[in-house]
Image (cartoon, coloured by chain):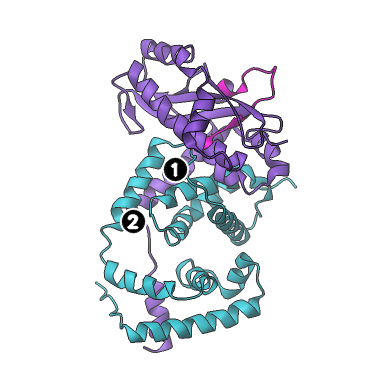
Amino acid sequence: MAGPDQASVEDAIEANTHALLAFFLRRTEVPEDAADLLSDTLLVVWRRRAAMPSESAEARMWMFGVARKVLLTQKRGSRRRSALHERLREELAQASGAAGEATYLSEVCEALLQLDRLDQEIIRLTYWDGFTLAEAARLLHMPEGTIRSRHHRARAQLKRILAAAPVSMPVEG
Amino acid sequence: MNDDELDELLRTMAPTPSARAQSTAVLVAREIRQPTRGVAALSGPKTRRRVVVAAAAAAALALAGAGTLAAYQLSIPPFQTLEKGVARSHSGIPFVYTNSLGRRVECLAFIEYENLDQQQRAAIEKLSKSRRWDGYGQRVLAKIAMPKASPEEQNAAIVDVIHQDLWQAAHEVVPSMVYMRVSDGPVYHGSSTSCAGPGGVDGRP
């Protein structure tokens, strides 16, 4: 398989870098770790670029598949660091302490953490990362029907949890 | 709370990186792919099997599985070398250790730097000749105290220690050097290692 050309890979990475960083930020206890995971993912994407689908939506799915594997095989330390990489780590650390909606955010996150791990991931993938249920099923390697029913159950459970500890919606503007 | 309100709440409460972090992430992504002049420094001696490993790849390599590990490492393209303006020492600092499988792993560690003058570069190159590196690999192995860890985990932990030791050594010979910051003066930009064992970087058969 020839795989996409360099420009296509660069375009796919450029189009998904923000989303990948957010993906990791939403799944790490230490925000700075998102920088390491992003770098690791991009290295794998480049190394395996011959396998990247040429169609952009499929390329996105493929990159998030890589991201999930990197997340699941995360190891302590062992990174080639660069000044830019360190800067990203610092910026992630700073931002985590200064979120304007931190209270609302933490209430929702705490509610989410009360769900089964798979259900948490389904909610994150669909509400936060913008995947459809069918795409979430592909990423999780599970039947779509299973994901659909678990999604339904997870929403109902979240509703109960949040109703017990009401969360005020942030006012826009 | 009705279903629509719940959906809205969940969507709006997604933790999101700051605009600044997002901008920097794009720069990091470009840095990772940028082919530069580091290639020549990595072509190295041809007499021994040589696998270049930027340490950032460690977690990624776990994806490959032991059987294809060497193939992954050997396929590392130029983008994984050096960013523009960054140079790597030509003289590798040797370290050898015996991993948890009882296999000998031979490695070289390189210092990556920016903005060094000729005299400072010479001082960095001279470091590799120091006797301080005699038996260094085994000392680091003892320091990480992970005798039962997998070869990959041992290698990853060793690389972390070496990264810090190289910084200290470089700082001793170039006192004006700063640690991994954006600066117009001398910068310790990072480190990389190159290891060879019976089956590759971690010495697996």
Residue A114: in magenta span: no
Residue at the outermost right position: A1
Q: Quadrant of the C terminus of chain A?
A: bottom left
For residue A15, side relative to residue B203 (left or right): left
Residue at point 55% right, 46% down?
A: B59
Which of the marked residues, 2 or 1, is nearer the chain's N terminus? Answer: 2
Query: Helix, strand, or loop for circle 2?
Result: loop
Q: Which chain is cyan?
A: A
| Chain containing mark 2 | B
As drawn, the label of residue B18 is 2
Q: Which residues are magenta?
A: B41-55
Which amino acid type is marked by label 2? Ser
Q: Identify residue type, mark 1.
A: Val
The subunit carrying tag 1 is B
Q: Is residue A147 above or below residue B42?
A: below
Q: Which mark is residue A51?
A: none
Q: Which residue is mark 1?
A: B28
* Residue B84 screen position, x and y as percent: 45, 29
Q: CA distance from mark 2 to mark 1?
A: 15 Å
Q: Along the line of sight, which residue is nearer the eye, A6 or A52? A: A52
Q: Nearer the viewer, residue A9 or A106?
A: A106
Tell me where residue B150 appears, x and y as whole percent.
61, 42
**Quadrant of the rendered image containing residue A30:** bottom left
* Identity of the residue drawn at 37% across and 46% down: A89
Residue B99 seen in the current view:
yes
Colour purple maps to chain: B
Indicate whether residue B46 is drawn in magenta.
yes
